[in-house]
Image: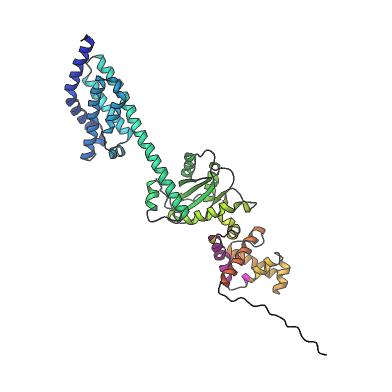
Amino acid sequence: MSEASSDKTRTLAWLKSITGDLSTTVLKRMEEQLPWFSQMPPGRRSAVGLVAQSGITAFVAWFENPEAAPWIAKDVFDTAPRELLRSVSLQQTLQLIRVVVDVFEERTKAATPMIREGVLRYSRDIAFAAADVYARAAEQRGLWDARLEALVVDSILTGEHDTELPSRVAALGWHGHGEVSVLVGTTPPVLEVDSLRRTARHNRADLLVGVQGNRLVLVIGRAKPAADLEEEPVSFLEIAKQLEPGFGEGRLVLGPEVPNVVTASRSARAALAGFSIVGAYRRAERPVLADDLLPERALAGDPLARQALVQRVYRPLADHQSDLLNTLWCYLDNGRSLEATARELFVHPNTVRYRLKRISEVIGWDATGAREALILQSALILGRIADSGPNEPRPTAQVRTPRRRSR
């Protein structure tokens, strides 16, 4: 046996003889220097101590066979239970490694250069192994979060969610307790999710991201209800404009504001309906509000749009005591002509002007505009259809019988 081999054998035997003492010293040093270690429950503190002891034993095995460094370093963290990786951060793990290395260096200060060099090399391998373990754990959590986020967004789009929706969005880091709106657009060639989330955070909003083929769906939620904010909240339309660069070219529709994430499916259905027909509105902006597409959505068969038009336009005018509904009908049927409307109603044109102003105050739309006229005309037609009902008897046409000529 060579002299170098004999020295390594004696050094290895000495290392094995002090492993127990090293483990005891490491545990005592952790209690003194690491506050988080002493505050842990006994079971987790024992698991952390087991990792430290495993590291010491693995160093002896590594010193005996340095070629086995990769798998020996990895095995140190394989002894830790999975819940320990979730409760001990990477920073705390590196502090643990530092304590073990310091104890090793103190005990091997008078030892051969071979051991001191081995401690340095092994501590490097252990640090890389720890980073690898936590990186893989973070990647798995990221994949799980991505799957959960896709499931949540899909349930919001379909409206098939249950009472577990709040807990699921909370697991994704959703802090929003205020209003919610859904933004639907085209998926860009390169999706920058982090950039979208930063923009949302800058506006004190949470964000859920879902990709469904060529559609990119963003669920935007305020951290607090608008009534609880000290200053005027940023509108969802303004947030959508800031998020617009993160979408692909083409259509971009913002659903209406709803009270919370549980009711977000209403906003999502409106945004999806608008997204499918926005091309029919030649002057649609980017982004465009789904409520600005009510006529097109109603013509395409969207029941939400039909209901919205009837409830927001027809019902308030029909329930009004004055003759606003009939005035609006006549005004639109006469091509928005004040004089023609006044002649048909046997009133002065100024009376028509006054009634149109009252109509605008009641429903919020100005009948004198071309786009608003289309919206109001659609609402009146849908309201009359809803009032007539399917069971109302239709008027029969009167058949004129020809008179007989008297001779």
Residue 240 rendering spot, x and y as whole percentages: 53, 47
Looking at the rendering, which quadrant does residue 46 occupy?
top left
85, 300: nearer the viewer: 300
Please identify the quadrant where the N terminus is shown: top left
Looking at the rendering, which quadrant does residue 332 occupy?
bottom right
Residue 142 rendering spot, x and y as whole percentages: 40, 40
Q: Which residues are magenta?
A: 304-325
Visible residue check, residue 126: yes
Confirm whether the magenta stretch covers residue 351: no
Residue 277 rendering spot, x and y as whole percentages: 59, 53
State the residue lying farthest toward the bottom.
Answer: 407
Please identify the quadrant where the C terminus is shown: bottom right
395, 100: nearer the viewer: 395
Height in image: 404 above or below 116? Answer: below
Height in image: 88 above or below 179? Answer: above
Instruction: Please state if 345 lies on the left or on the right of 202 as rendered.
Output: right
Residue found 22% across the figure and 31% down from its top: 32
Visible residue check, residue 38: no
